[in-house]
């Protein structure tokens, strides 16, 4: 198992993998790390847009399943 998964709680929520990737993208982005901005500010600037869209689509598919 990869090192970054050791001693980590399992996340059984919907879209957990995409959520983790999206979070890591934002927190490790130069916008946050070097410029010292809040992750929400970096999102508004369009950083990690592909993962944001994927996470939204995943969550939306969960809502669609509940409505069916």
Image (cartoon, helix red, strand yellow):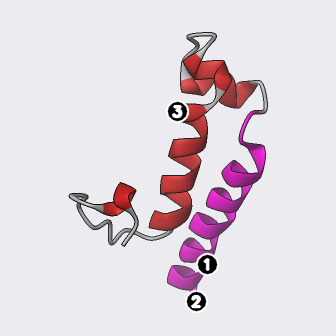
Q: Position of residue 54 (x, y in %)?
A: 69, 61
Residue 9 falls left or right of residue 59: left
Highlighted magenta segment, given as a residue range:
47-68
Q: Quadrant of residue 39?
A: top right
Q: Are marks 1 and 2 in contact (CB under 8 Å)?
A: yes
Marks 1 and 3 in Cβ contact (< 8 Å)? no
Density class for disc 1 (Cα within 10 Å; few <14, some 14-19, many ≥20) is: few
Q: Can you identify the residue that label 1 sits on?
A: 64
Q: Nearer the viewer, residue 37 or 14?
A: 37
- The quadrant of the image that shows the C terminus is bottom right
Helix or strand or loop: what does disc 3 sit on? helix
Which badge, 1 or 3, is on the more N-terminal residue? 3
The image position of residue 27, as x and y in percent, is 52, 33
Labelled disc at residue 68: 2
| Residue that mark 3 sits on | 27
Residue 34, numbered label: none
Q: CA distance from mark 2 to mark 3?
A: 35 Å
Q: Furthest residue to the top?
A: 35
């Amino acid at each position: 198992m990869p090192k970054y998964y050791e001693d980590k709680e399992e996340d059984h929520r919907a879209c957990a993998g995409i959520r983790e990737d999206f979070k890591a993208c934002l927190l490790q982005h130069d916008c946050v790390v070097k410029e010292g901005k809040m992750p929400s500010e970096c999102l508004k600037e369009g950083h990690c847009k592909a993962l944001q869209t994927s996470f939204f689509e995943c969550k939306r598919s969960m809502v669609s399943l509940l409505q069916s």
